[in-house]
Image (cartoon, helix red, strand yellow):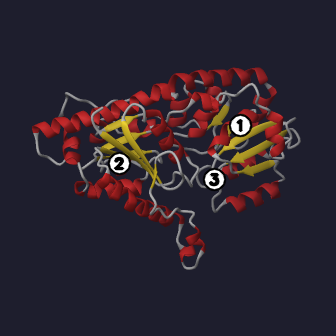
Amino acid sequence: MNGRVALACSGIGHVNRGYEASVTELFNAVSNRIDVQLYRGQGKSPGQTCLTTIGRHSPLYSIWPLSLIGAYSRYRNENYSFALHLILSLFVRPVDIVFTPDHCLAVLLKRIHWLLPRRPVIVFSNGAPFENSFCDSFAVVHQKSYEHYVRSEGTELHKKSWLIPNGFDANRLRKPDSFSRDKVLKQLGVDPNVTVVLALSAHNNTHKRVDWLLSEFVKLDQKEFALIIAGQPTGEAAELKRMRDELGCNATFVTVAEKAVPELIWASDMMALCSLSEGFPRAVAEAMGGGKHIFVHPHKNSRWIVGENEFCFVDMEKESALANALQHAASNPELLAASAARNYRRFVNQFTWENVAVAYVNMFVELLAVRQQLDRNSRQLPDHGIREHLRHNSGIQPGRSD
């Protein structure tokens, strides 16, 4: 591929979410196929650290009056401070495409891209996901949300969008013969003799609905079940722990490094995710790749990921539905094992990097082909020219992974 790509994500190195993991893994998957550089907020490897980054969890925010700054403003500040070093780096190493899931960064780069060498195309990776009305302002959009992609059919946005899921390393999620379930659970203070339910989820109510999970889980026999909630703490974490204690719920809150996530999956008997909507919930695909059954709400994106395994779907707004599903699954180990095996087969066929990386590379190659055609045929600004080309040209069409 004759062109350069930059992958940029301000949270890499200090935030453990799907955004950061997906961009890091994308870099690892395509770095031997295209000329690509990864720009991260903190950390040592891979990629280049943007030294100007003031992370959203910076100690500066413990000092008054900075402590009064809200979570969203901290994220925005992180993006803008990250951008200072990134922009300087793009002058030293010009690129043709900048790919980022950070919406504040994407908007900033879109506004100033004409000042940068080569006037790079800004690809906004819509992982949150943001509504299509927001995405439409970008020349190119990478959609992880099947629901949003389908909703854009018949619009101009659809013509400049690529639907490509997250990719995953199957080897990372494959349980080794030497794995000790008892050892991992005992280290967490969890009884290995009970049925263990895992939730890979930020410790919050507003989106991940951990409060709903606790209220459902406590309906089970707490001597026979244990719940592990593994994810990033939020401002609601203390409230959730108080709720756990008041309910008498046998639940453990933990935060682990990304590399430790597979061990939690292997140590669990099943998984659950109570959010009512998601862009591309990594926890679902990771459960599938780790050979586990998972219960999720039947929104369009979870159905796109899980496929036709109806046993996985639970109405997370219906009282006792999840509790009953967990009890039924624990009482039917053969059904649970068959569902896990079915999930694993779909994971291997749809979401491993061996398959997904090709779709990302094709997207970058097609965008570079459009740029080169425009360079030969016109003097339009690349960003505007690519948008018009994707709208009107029938020769080169955006690639999609449906």
Residue 95 percent across, percent down from the top left: 30, 46
Q: Nearer the viewer, residue 182 or 216?
A: 182
User: Closer to the observer: label 1 or label 3?
Assistant: 1
Q: Which amino acid is tagged 1?
A: Glu
Q: Earlier in the sequence, mark 1 or mark 2?
A: 2
| Mark pair 3, 2: CA separation | 27 Å
Which numbered marker is on residue 135? 2
Measured as percent of width and height from the top left, residue 315 is found at: 63, 38
Check disc 3 and give the amino acid type.
Gln
Task: Give the quarter of the figure containing the C terminus.
Answer: top left
Within-10-Å neighbours for mark 1: few <14, some 14–19, many 20+: many
Q: Residue at x 33, y 35 (%)?
A: 364
- Residue ID at (22%, 41%): 386
**Element type where label 2 sits in the image:** helix
Q: CA distance from mark 1 to mark 2?
A: 36 Å
Marked residue nearer the N-terminal end (1 or 3): 3
| 63 vs 94, nearest the viewer | 94
Q: Position of residue 61 (x, y in %)?
A: 56, 71
Amino acid type of the residue tagged 2 in the rendering: Cys
Marker disc for residue 263: 1
Q: Residue at x 63, y 53 (%)?
A: 232
Mark in the foreground, 1 or 2: 1
Residue at 51% over, 36% down: 301
- The residue carrying mark 3 is 232
